[in-house]
Amino acid sequence: MSPTVFIPEPISSKGIELLKSKVDIVAPWLENKEWSEEESRSLLNSSNAVIVRLFKVGKEDIDRSSDLRVIAKHGVGVDNIDLQAAAERQIPVVYTPTANSNAVAEHTIALMMALARKIGPAAETVRQGRFSERIQFQGVELAGKTLGVIGLGRIGKRVAEIASKGLGMRVVAYDPFVQLVEGDEDIVVAGRVEKVLGESDFLSLHVPLTAETKHLINGKTIELLKTDCRILNTSRGAIIDERVLVKALQEGGIAGAALDVFEEEPIPTDHLLCTAPNILLTPHISSSTKESLDRMAVDAAQGVLDVLEGRPSRYPYPMEKLS
């Protein structure tokens, strides 16, 4: 009998093709079916493996899934998976840390350019027939500006490279695990996060969500930013205290923000962020390119097959991060 893999959310057909000859796939969306939350949890509980995007796998799910042998994250951030519960059950978690790096980095740069040139509101003005109001959309150039990058993993480093080499920006970065970016003298690695905050014209966040990084941008740290600084977040929503951000935007404490991620997703339409000034919002799409989605689906599927077939997976999530 073939193992059962539950896939609650759509993934690229390339991942499905890799799996289908070796496992039984349970994916209601492939048949255009809509399942209730209770039905989805029941499918998870009876499966040997699961591949998730934003679907949450909590301790109760893991405790009830007696035959679960591997959890795969289609992406990088694993905050929707209870890693501690998985570790206690000795269920490996695999993920796709290299698949979406370029896509997320490019989206970050796109947000930065759109924010700098007020692309969103300017486009809306044209659609509303208010062309003559174009004078209010004076932007700023990126060349010569300082980009602060917090987190120099694959995505943060790629953002820094594009900004410095392609856009002529000065880049100053902070990462507690990185002292020097070898082979790239254009990226200055600061010893303190406060230096990055104080010097940034644009600040880009690229850290995982942990107890240490939750609300990294808070009432104290946001006061270290220059009033003409603009914040970019394509990592995880809870890195920023959203109420603090809205207050800073309303009071002119910072010049703008562009967010692809939110503490609550989907973000409610009546959320304070939706009416804040000088803000650009996208619906968690930074990794959504054809190329990236293909790579994530294949890497997640291969990770599942590796575990089910008794091989070491290429990208096991480092559980030592839990300690």
Image (cartoon, helix red, strand yellow):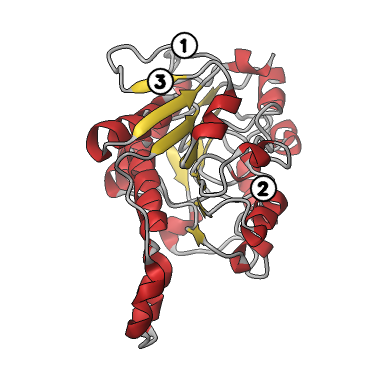
Where does residue 108 sit, x and y in percent of width and height? 40, 45
Q: Secondary structure at mark 1?
A: loop
Q: Earlier in the sequence, mark 3 or mark 2?
A: 2
Where does residue 162 sit, x and y in percent of width and height? 29, 35
- Where is mark 3, residue-wise? 188
Task: Residue type at mark 3: give it.
Answer: Val
**Residue drawn at point x = 57 percent, y = 21 percent:** 92
- Where is mark 1, residue-wise? 179
Circle number at residue 3: none
Q: Earlier in the sequence, mark 1 or mark 2?
A: 2
Q: Nearer the viewer, mark 1 or mark 2?
A: 1
Q: Earlier in the sequence, mark 1 or mark 3?
A: 1
Image quadrant where residue 310 sits: top left
Callout 3 touching callout 2 (CB < 8 Å): no
Q: Nearer the viewer, mark 1 or mark 3?
A: 3
Image quadrant where residue 86 sits: top right
- Where is mark 2, residue-wise? 42
Mark 3, residues whose alpha carbon is within 10 Å: few (<14), some, or many (≥20)? some
Say whether residue 136 is visible: yes
